[in-house]
């Protein structure tokens, strides 16, 4: 019984040491940085509007239709 109790204590001590070691590693790995942080970039420019894309596609379609009409013969239409 004493051997079993000793093994349990050794196991508990091992797990506690392993947990402390892991906690120390995490504190070092994810340590906060000191000093000034980078300046936040808040001067973002807006990109092109989706309306311009739709109008451009509509214009291309209309131009394609006009070209189609210009290239057909009068009797085939």
Image (cartoon, helix red, strand yellow):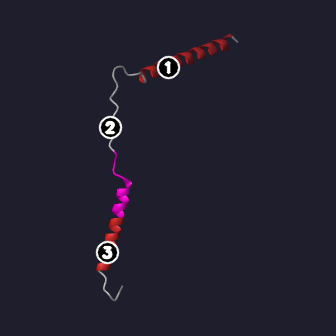
Label 3 Cα crowd, 10 Å radius (few <14 / some 14-19 / many 20+) = few
- Residue 26 lies, in percent from the top left, at 46, 22
Cα–Cα gap, marks 1 and 3 = 72 Å
Residue 42, above or below 35: below
- The vertical placement of 61 against 30, above or below, is below
Q: CA distance from mark 1 to mark 2?
A: 40 Å
Tell whether position 64 is magenta. no
Q: Position of residue 57 (x, y in %)?
A: 35, 63
- Mark carried by residue 43: 2
Residue 44 position by quadrant: top left
- Secondary structure state at the residue bearing disc 2: loop
Q: Which residues are magenta?
A: 46-57
Which residue is label 3 attached to? Answer: 66
Q: Quadrant of the N terminus?
A: top right
- Give the labeled residue for mark 1: 23
Say left or right for 67 vs 54: left
Cβ–Cβ under 8 Å for marks 1 and 2: no
**Given the current orientation, which residue lies at the most extreme top position?**
2
Callout 1: few (<14), some (14-19), or many (20+) C-alpha neighbours within 10 Å?
A: few
Residue placed at 41% from the left, 22% from the top? 32
**Which is more toward the observer, 15 or 6?**
15
Q: At x 59% / y 14%, what residue is drawn? A: 10
Our reading of the magenta stretch's main secondary structure is helix
Near-viewer residue (20 or 37): 37
- Tell which of 9 and 19 is nearer to you: 19
Q: CA distance from mark 2 to mark 3?
A: 43 Å
Query: In the picture shown, does residue 13 fall above or below 49?
Result: above
Q: Residue at x 36, y 52 (%)?
A: 49
Of labels 1 and 3, earlier in sequence is: 1
* Element assignment for label 3: helix
């Amino acid at each position: 019984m004493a051997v079993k109790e000793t093994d349990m204590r050794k196991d508990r001590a091992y797990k506690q040491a392993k947990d402390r070691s892991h906690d120390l590693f995490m504190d070092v790995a994810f340590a906060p940085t000191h000093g000034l942080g980078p300046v936040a970039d808040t001067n973002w420019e807006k990109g092109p509007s989706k309306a311009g894309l739709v109008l451009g596609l509509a214009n291309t379609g209309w131009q394609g239709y006009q070209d189609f009409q210009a290239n057909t013969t009068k009797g085939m239409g």
